[in-house]
Amino acid sequence: MFAEIGMEAFAERARGELVTAGAKLRQHHLEAREDLTPQEEQIARLARDGLSNPEIGTQLFLSPRTVEWHLHKVFGKLGIDSRKGLPAALPLQERERRPLVES
């Protein structure tokens, strides 16, 4: 309910308490990817490709802590709990698969 009304911090805290109490959490729907902001999607793709938080921050002019905060939101929206879930949640798009043309 907290997530539905935009109170993500309270939603994460409630999820943590529920897990600690032994509850099984519902999985998010696959449409959640559409809820990612453009910046969240960019950060998630860079993390999926193996960049660390400081590397992502340098590339996007953000602090590593800000990158971490965005990734935490991304994990919640995609229904995953770590970077290991990013390749399945964000598969390569066609334009990402094409090799670069050599000159």
Image: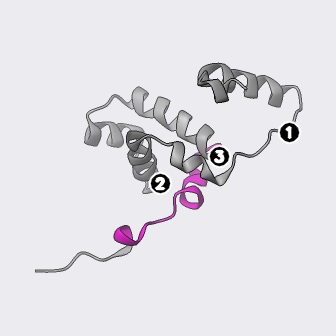
The x and y percentages for residue 61 are 26, 34
The x and y percentages for residue 79 are 66, 45
Name the quarter where the C terminus is drawn. bottom left
Q: Nearer the viewer, residue 10 or 47?
A: 10
The x and y percentages for residue 95 are 34, 69
**Which residue is denoted by mark 2 in the rendering?**
48
Left/right of residue 69 with respect to residue 9 in the rendered view: left
* Gap between marks 1 and 2 measured at Cα: 26 Å
Which amino acid is tagged 1?
A: Lys
The numbered disc on residue 86 is none
Tell me if residue 52 is in the magenta stretch.
no
Q: What is the crowding at mark 3: few (fewer than 14 residues within 10 Å), some, or many (at least 20)?
A: some
* Boundaries of the magenta span: 80-96
Q: Secondary structure at mark 3?
A: loop
Residue located 61% across and 21% down the image: 7
Q: Is residue 39 positioned above or below 47 on the image?
A: above
Which amino acid is tagged 3?
A: Ile
- Residue mark closest to the camera, 1 vs 2: 1
The part of the image, by quadrant, that contains residue 101 is bottom left
**Which residue is denoted by mark 3 in the rendering?**
80
Q: Is residue 32 positioned above or below 7 on the image?
A: below
Residue located 35% across and 42% down the image: 56
